[in-house]
Amino acid sequence: MSEAVPARAGTITMPAAGPEPDLEFLGAEKRIGDKVLLGPLDLRVPRGQRVALIGPSGAGKTTLLRLIAGVLWPSAGTVRVLGMTTGQLRGRALANLRRQVGFLHQQDNLVPGLRVAHNVLMGRLGHWSLLRSLWSLVWPQQIEVAHAALQRVELGNRLWALPDELSGGEQQRVAIARLLVQAPRILLADEPVSALDIRLGRDVIRLLLGIAAGNTTTITSLHSLDLLAEGFDRVLALRGGRLVFDGPPSQLSRELLHEVYGAEYRTLNLDELNLGEVDLPRSAQG
């Protein structure tokens, strides 16, 4: 594991008192055997915040997202999501958590043999009975809900298309429509535009953040730093499983990114990444 970089705090501070945050990590750590994948981590994220997660490969970004989703449980410490301690959840309680947490993956995970309508309505499975879910495969239920979601992502005319008839950007927008009908309280995205060109990537990130605006907390893992300029409130930078920066995009600097990315820093063309759009301090732009 890479040597941890001393943490730096930004201007964003989480109050000790007040409304309970949507996400809270209290000394949380995830290990596999003797290897520490993440932590120990202390972190609070209030409702509605739009958070970008950055760091090199293997930094712990996906592990953090999976801990929030209840797919993984912490090896030590506590992870609380929407007031629920994830490591204590089983059965219906765990299903209830996962229904309220939407997850957009690198690959859109659409079912190839099913029409767009069916793929979108899969976002309702956590809200339906088993019988209704099975019946929807034969006769789609709440088709008007699926159509409305597709209209919001500008694909209202693709309701009965098959996934392989869509472009990569369209498939990712279908996955976002699926999240819309799920109506999650927390939206997680794990490098959702890594397979798209930068223009389509910007469109998807803007759409994602626009849909999530309001009471939906959003945490998005990014592989392209220039996407930080698309409206994120807060940046969490990980290296070697440790949180090394927590603050607004405006406080990022070239020196910090060198510390975060280590040897990978030389592969980042910061001029092409347009970091000036993130309003870097003048001293960091020279």
Image (tube, grey):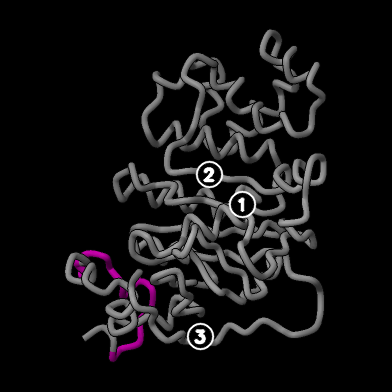
Q: Which mark is residue 187?
A: 1
Per the model, the C-alpha gap separating discs 1 and 3 is 23 Å
Query: Mark 3 sits on what residue?
Result: 10
Between 235 and 31, the residue placed more toward the observer is: 31
Disc 2 marks which residue? Answer: 104
Q: Was residue 98 drawn as part of the magenta stretch in this picture?
A: no
Q: Is residue 51 above or below residue 177?
A: below
Q: Quadrant of residue 88?
A: bottom right
Relative horizontal placement of residue 277, taking residue 82 as reference (left or right):
left
Mark 2 surroundings: few (<14), some (14-19) or many (≥20) residues within 10 A: many
- The residue lying toward the viewer, choosing from 198 and 6, is 6
Q: Which residues are magenta?
A: 269-283
Residue 184 located left or right of residue 172: right
Q: Earlier in the sequence, mark 1 or mark 3?
A: 3
Mark closer to the chain start, 3 or 2: 3
Give the distance between the C-alpha atoms of the residues marked 2 and 1, in whole angstroms. Answer: 8 Å
Label 3 SS: loop
Q: Where in the figure is residue 124, as x and y percent of width and height?
A: 72, 31
Q: Residue at x 54, y 16 (%)?
A: 115
User: What residue type is disc 1 on?
Assistant: Leu
Q: Are marks 2 and 1 in contact (CB under 8 Å)?
A: yes
C-alpha gap between disc 3 and disc 2:
27 Å
Instruction: Identify the residue at horizontal 61%, vertical 34% (top origin).
Output: 178
Which element carries disc 1, helix, strand or loop? strand
Query: If the image is split into quadrants, where does the N terminus sit?
Result: bottom left
Q: Helix or strand or loop: what does disc 2 sit on?
A: strand
